[in-house]
Amino acid sequence: MSNVTTRTEPDKQMPLVGKMMLAAVLAAVAGLMFGLDIGVISGALKFIAQEFKASDAEQEQIVSSMMLGAALGALFAGQLSFRFGRKKALVLSAILFMLGALFCVIAQSVAVLVVARALLGLAIGIASFVAPLYISEVADEQHRGGLISVYQLMITIGILLAFISDALFSYSGAWRWMLGIVAIPGAVFLIGSLFLPDSPRWLMLRGRPDEALETLAALRPSRNAAEAEIREIEGSLDHKQRGLAMFRENPNFRRSVMLGIGLQIVQQLTGINVVMYYAPRIFEVAGFGQDGQMWGTAVVGLVNMLATFIAISFVDRWGRRPMLIAGFIIMATGMGALAVLLSFGAGSSVMMHYLAVAVLLLFITGFAFSAGPLIWVLCAEVQPLQGRDFGITCSTVTNWVANWVVGMTFLTLLGTLGASHTFWLYAALNAAFILVTLAFVPETRGVSLESLEQKLNRGVRLRDIGR
Ligand code: BGC
């Protein structure tokens, strides 16, 4: 424990251990489910409404019951993952996910569909809490950022697949297929999660150091590396408080919790889900027909996925802060340009029409290599071990509540401010987030979780805890 300095040099690249990579990728499949469910409903809703003759209010319930379920799922996930372990929580979320998908397929009324979507939400809430946390706990510091970004990649693949399946099934109106097909990755996730090792940090938290060492040794290039890491983890168990008590009494922990909450608010206020949920509408305003809207939306999904590779490749080399700042600059520019175009009437000429698409894709690219993955990365990294479940619960619940708020307010904003001013607002917010990043966001590249925790506990400024 005293020998923390014997830790492997942070700058030296360790060979990537296949098992660690596999564990992280399997856990990231949770992201696939997250993405599928975010993406699938926009295409299915029209047909569901037709079959059940659902009113606007009922349609809103079908959409928002998932967010509500997700916020609830994330709220309970902390307790679940602390008591039963990250792995069992992931298995539970896979089971709930499949049940939810099944109920969607057989639903004969709006009420059953609302319950089924809430069940799916619960599953996603748990998964979106546990997956990045689990990955941060099994990964070594040289690959942590990239591996957590794989989780975001899975979200984007899920969204893309959902957009494509929506487009394909829309010709036949087969909404039960659109919703049911997500059970397939659910089954893959269930089988995969049964084979995951327990998180070594969780085993330590539960007082099972021998198992922790065995598990970690299988995930690291050498037993020595695993032993050194275990000693470091032991150091972070010195603090006796946990969760809410720790939040009340430890001002340093309050800072990391507030940082996590703030980061997730920032992620949602970039306006990403305005684009995700309303892309077809934006394409319509830009003058595209029905087919163009659907396939244009699929292109948005594709670019979102492809640009995530930039984060996976470079986040552990360039660092979190520069990539976030670059992303906010691009997003502010994209939103601002969209605002200008809309004030001229984006659909008024063919050139404007394509310019609108180009700036939308610029915005998506900016998000996908920065705030998309990096907010999840940072939220999983900055919490001290004893308060990690509580801290990440707070940030994940915030993600879902903020997601819901943005979705609910967008149309009102359009109605009151008009399209151009609404996008100006998002441009200004993204510009402000550059300053927020400079002031508060730490650079966590190549730094162990335990070292971040030591600095946080010493009262070092948030933006300096990675130095
Ligand atoms: C966000 C989601 C968003 C998705 C888009 C995620 O990081 O949390 O709200 O829909 O990225 O790719």
Image (tube, rainbow, N blue to C red):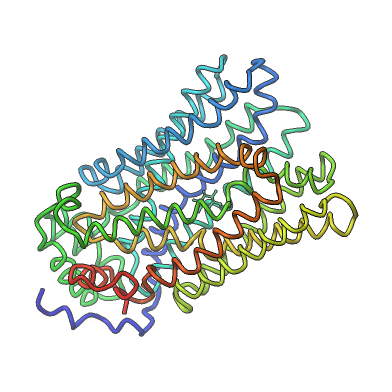
> Which picture quadrant has residue 75?
top left
Direction front: furthest residue = 416
Determine whether 422 is above or below 439 in the image: above
Which residue is found at the position 44% from the left and 43% from the top?
Answer: 400
Percent x, y of residue 420 = 71, 51
Determine whether 334 is above or below 466 in the image: above
Determine whether 363 is above or below 422 in the image: below
Percent x, y of residue 83 = 20, 43
Q: Nearer the viewer, residue 364 or 209?
A: 364
| Placement of the C terminus among the 4 image quadrants | bottom left
Say whether residue 162 is left or right of residue 373.
right
Which residue is found at the position 18% from the left and 66% from the top?
Answer: 233
Percent x, y of residue 30 = 45, 47
Which residue is found at the position 9% from the left and 77% from the top?
Answer: 2
Say whether residue 404 is left or right of residue 274.
left
Q: Nearer the viewer, residue 104 or 319?
A: 319
> Which picture quadrant has residue 415?
top right
| Placement of the N terminus among the 4 image quadrants | bottom left
Q: Nearer the viewer, residue 212 or 53?
A: 53
Which residue is found at the position 76% from the left and 28% from the top?
Answer: 172
Say whether residue 372 is left or right of residue 349.
left
Percent x, y of residue 217 = 24, 68
Q: Nearer the viewer, residue 110 or 328?
A: 328
> In this figure, what is the number of numbered marks?
0
